[in-house]
Amino acid sequence: LEILRFKPTGETIKDFYAEVPVTLKLAGSYHQAAAFFDAVSKMERIVNIQGLTLGGAKVVKGKTTLSVNCNAITFRFVENSTNPKGKKGGKKK
């Protein structure tokens, strides 16, 4: 599988975390793409795949190559969240 583009597109800060989106463009066989997404699903970090498109099938040397485009979104903790330090949200019972 060939990674043609890996482009971070700017974080979005939420309450206590930030979304970190990355635009991906890949080229390879269907099985290579499936193996890539399977490996991503097994990472310790949460990664959501959105807007997945497969297309542009080409046969090169007897092998079919697809163009794969998607957005991968991962997350990171934001140290200075809106909650005061040491306080947790929610009611205690």
Image (cartoon, rainbow, N blue to C red):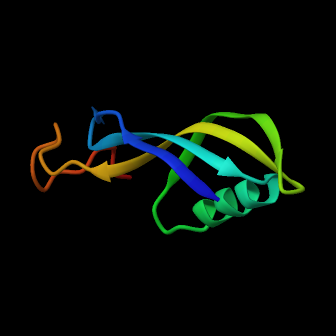
Q: Position of residue 73 (x, y in %)?
A: 46, 43
Can you say which quadrant of the picture contains the N terminus? bottom right
Front-lying residue, 55 or 13 = 55
Residue pictured at 16% horizontal, 37% vertical: 82
Residue drawn 33% across and 44% down?
Answer: 90
Question: Is 21 positioned to the left or the right of 29 in the image?
Answer: left
Which residue is pictured at 58% across the width and 61% down the height?
40
Q: How many marks?
A: 0
Residue 64 % position (x, y): 84, 49
Residue 48: x and y in percent read 55, 45
Instruction: Give residue 79's position: percent from left, percent from top.
Output: 15, 51
Place residue 91 in its image quadrant.
top left
**Residue 39, above or below 49:** below
The one nearer the camera, 24 or 42, is 24
Q: Residue 56 sits in which quadrant?
A: top right
Position of residue 57 in the picture relative to residue 27 (left or right):
right
